[in-house]
Amino acid sequence: MEPGSHERQQTVRDLEKIAVFMDAKFPLPFGFKVGWDGLIGLVPVVGDLVTTFVSIYIVGRAAHLGARVNVILHMLMNILVDALASKIPFVGWLVDFGWKSNLRNIALVKKHVAAPAETARSSGLLVWGLLTVFSLLTLGLVVLFVFFVMWIVGFIQTAFMAG
């Protein structure tokens, strides 16, 4: 057994308790569970800050356990999805109750502890894939904006030439 493995396992168990508390504390009919994340998230602004702080704490502890950068970025992306979706009325509440970013992140921590290299590789592929998609979408929006501005300029020039 590697040095500190008992402490690592205890940390993972502690983090899992926090994740369950936040994402799956209360059982509902049909096997669905909700946690404090969704309930606290109903409080405007403050709720999102509190739940995001707890999620970031889990990421910080994962970093302390030695999670690689790719895994940390993957965890942060899970939190980002939750945080961005929470800005959309009603949809954000559904995401708070359904996305369960803390449980997703604990699953990543457990995978990291069991197989660090494999978890870092798969997280890296996801992170780079999402960054590529985001970059292409951003580039597409910039191109559309440029064409829109060119169209507006052409429209104005035509309006002044005709008038």
Image (cartoon, helix red, strand yellow):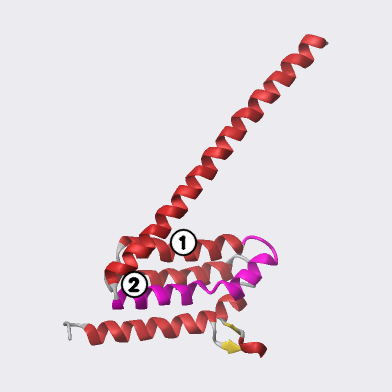
Q: Is residue 129 above or below residue 67?
A: above
- Disc 2 residue type (three-letter): Ala
Question: Mark 1 packing: few (<14 Cα in 10 Å), some, or many (20+)?
Answer: some
Residue 53, position in %: x, y?
A: 46, 69
User: In the rendered image, which quarter contains the C terminus?
Assistant: top right
Amino acid type, callout 1 = Met
Task: Name the spot of residue 29 as percent of width and height, x first.
Answer: 67, 90
Side of 32 relative to 109 (left or right) = right
Most frequent secondary structure within the magenta stretch: helix
Quarter holding residue 46: bottom right
Residue that mark 1 sits on = 77
- Side (left or right) of 80 relative to 111: right
Q: Residue at x 65, y 70 (%)?
A: 93
* SS at circle 1: helix
Residue behind mark 2: 62
Counting from the top left corner in percent of width and height, residue 49 is at: 53, 67
Q: Residue at x 46, y 73 (%)?
A: 104
User: Pointer 1 and pointer 2: residues touching (CB < 8 Å)?
Assistant: no
Secondary structure at badge 2 equals helix
Residue occupying the point 49% across, 65% down:
79
**Mark 2: few, some, or many residues within 10 Å (few <14, many ≥20)?**
many
Q: Which residues are magenta?
A: 87-114
